[in-house]
Image: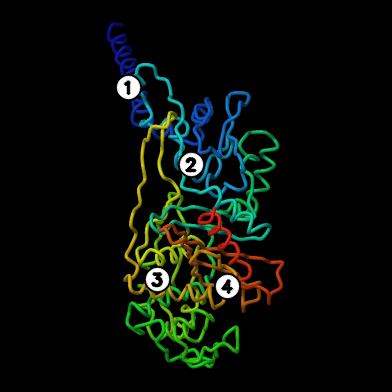
């Protein structure tokens, strides 16, 4: 009997030890994975137990919190939701969070360790949520929104000296307020917005890529000057018009048949957007040199975080010479985000230095104390200052005497480049209208912009970068430099 009791006791002890090991494993080794599991309702309850911190634009919150019901005490709210959705993203009780709401979720809900007081370990109280201070300029953001109107498109504005993103607009937009709760109305709105892979919520300024068309001629121009193919923008080029693509019978023509594009200088070619000149420049340089110059501007940079990750802009590889020629005018398989084309103009305006774009200046606690600051960061020396100055001068000529006159602003120095990019199989779709530019007021203050307009209702023959996208860039420049 004693032996049986001893064996039973030993067995029970082993069970207790096994249970203790398992509990310890769960509580220590697996705690982090359970804590981060999206199915853990406690995380959602904790996140919305108190008002969230805010995302600030121009020093004012564009987010807020309101009392909710049930187990979730508070619900996120948005002021001017459609205007700032490309900046904030959303924070939803049912569907998680995106963009700044997601990247800085712990700061906003107070769980970031940097917000904790020295006595937090004793009181176990969660601090009030901190704030995200953005670089977005509300006047520039509103000007881009108003100028785009009901058209489908996107606009980006950057301070060339610092890389600060001043505007980030995507239209048509949507209202994050529709999905912040857990009601039947929120569920219906989510179903509608998430249809077609969530395209209604797509941030086109950062996450959509398009053929950049003739705005890419700025990259081709930089490659020509940096590689010594031509020494000056006013030097005549060897450019027959029309131009037959190498190794083919395909003849490349220009939009304006009467434009002086035969052997035109690079300045004249930029003013009139001469396809023959820039296609031949690209073919003469070759894929390797063109790709290297595009990479300096940011093409092929797969991890560009602003801090939301931007889609990768692409300069293709493995091409025949005729295809390289087409890349020189922003066609074939070249793709770019609006942010990328704003970066091109920013580098020109900043003497060839490209600053890393960012839309967050600092993080603060609830009382305004800085938790983390994000200063300017240099991304690359894209080209020499001499090359940048030459392109700067040629871009000004585009606005004063060329296809970009619609972007001119009295009292400002404005340089730009128009683009009308082919769209669809055999160019069957309505073309994309592009404009990228910089503007300066003479005091050292300046802005670089890029706009793409996809106006499916427009007359195909009326789609021009200068006519549709140029006025949006003009509106942003005026809002920033002439208020």
Picture residue at 47% right of the left edge, 88% below the top: 264
- The residue that mark 3 highlights is 294
Secondary structure at badge 2 equals: helix
> Along the polypeptide, which appears first: circle 1 or circle 4?
1
Q: Nearer the viewer, mark 2 or mark 3?
A: 3
- The residue that mark 2 highlights is 102
Picture residue at 61% right of the left edge, 61% below the top: 153
Q: Could you tell me how far apart the alpha carbons at marks 3 and 1 are, in whole angstroms?
A: 50 Å
Do the CB atoms of the residues marked 3 and 1 lie less than 8 Å apart?
Answer: no
> Along the polypeptide, which appears first: circle 3 or circle 4?
3
Instruction: Reply above or below: 277 against 213.
Output: below
Where residue 240 appears, as percent x and y from the top left, is: 49, 93
Do the CB atoms of the residues marked 2 and 1 lie less than 8 Å apart?
Answer: no
Q: Could you tell me how far apart the alpha carbons at marks 1 and 4 are, in whole angstroms?
A: 60 Å
Q: Could you tell me how far apart the alpha carbons at marks 2 and 3 are, in whole angstroms?
A: 31 Å
Q: Nearer the viewer, mark 2 or mark 1?
A: 1
> Along the polypeptide, which appears first: circle 2 or circle 4?
2
């Amino acid at each position: 009997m004693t032996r049986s009791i001893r064996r039973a006791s030993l067995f029970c002890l082993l069970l207790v030890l096994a249970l203790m090991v398992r509990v310890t494993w769960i509580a220590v080794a697996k705690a982090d994975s359970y804590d981060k599991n999206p199915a853990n309702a406690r995380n959602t309850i904790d996140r919305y137990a108190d008002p969230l911190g805010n995302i600030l634009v121009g020093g004012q919150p564009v987010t807020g919190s309101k009392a909710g019901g049930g187990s979730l005490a508070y619900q996120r709210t948005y002021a001017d939701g459609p205007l700032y959705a490309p900046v904030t993203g959303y924070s939803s009780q049912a569907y998680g969070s995106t963009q700044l709401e997601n990247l800085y979720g712990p700061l906003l809900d107070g769980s970031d360790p940097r917000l904790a007081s020295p006595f937090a370990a004793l009181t176990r109280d969660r601090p009030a949520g901190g704030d995200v201070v953005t670089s977005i300029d509300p006047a520039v953001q509103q000007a881009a929104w108003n100028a785009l109107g009901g058209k489908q498109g996107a606009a980006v504005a950057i301070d060339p000296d610092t890389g600060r993103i001043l505007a980030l607009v995507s239209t048509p937009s949507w209202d994050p307020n529709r999905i912040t709760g857990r009601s039947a109305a929120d569920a219906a709105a989510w179903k509608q917005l998430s249809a077609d892979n969530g395209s209604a919520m797509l941030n086109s300024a950062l996450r959509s890529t398009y053929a950049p068309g003739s705005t890419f001629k700025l990259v081709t121009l930089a490659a020509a000057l940096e590689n010594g193919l031509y020494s000056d923008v006013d030097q005549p080029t060897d450019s027959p018009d029309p131009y037959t693509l190498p190794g083919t019978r395909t003849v490349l023509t220009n939009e304006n048949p009467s434009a002086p594009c035969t052997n035109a200088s690079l300045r004249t070619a930029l003013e009139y957007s001469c396809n023959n000149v820039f296609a031949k420049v690209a073919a003469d340089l070759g894929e390797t040199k063109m790709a290297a110059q595009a990479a300096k501007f940011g093409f092929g940079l797969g991890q560009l975080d602003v801090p939301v990750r931007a889609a990768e802009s692409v300069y293709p590889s493995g091409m025949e010479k005729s295809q390289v020629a087409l890349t020189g005018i922003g066609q074939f398989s070249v793709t770019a985000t609006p942010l990328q084309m704003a970066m091109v103009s920013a580098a020109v305006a900043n003497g060839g230095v490209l600053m890393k774009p960012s839309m967050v200046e600092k993080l603060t606690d609830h009382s305004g104390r800085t938790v983390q600051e994000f200063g300017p960061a240099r991304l690359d020396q894209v080209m020499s200052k001499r090359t940048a100055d030459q392109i700067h001068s040629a871009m000004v000529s585009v606005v004063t005497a060329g296809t970009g006159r619609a972007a001119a602003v009295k009292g400002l120095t404005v340089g730009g480049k128009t683009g009308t990019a082919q769209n669809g199989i055999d160019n069957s779709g309505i073309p994309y209208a592009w404009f990228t530019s910089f503007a300066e007021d003479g005091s050292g203050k300046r802005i670089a912009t890029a706009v793409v307009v996809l106006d499916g209702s427009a007359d195909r023959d009326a789609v021009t970068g200068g006519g549709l996208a140029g006025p949006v860039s003009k509106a942003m420049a005026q809002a920033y430099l002439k208020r």
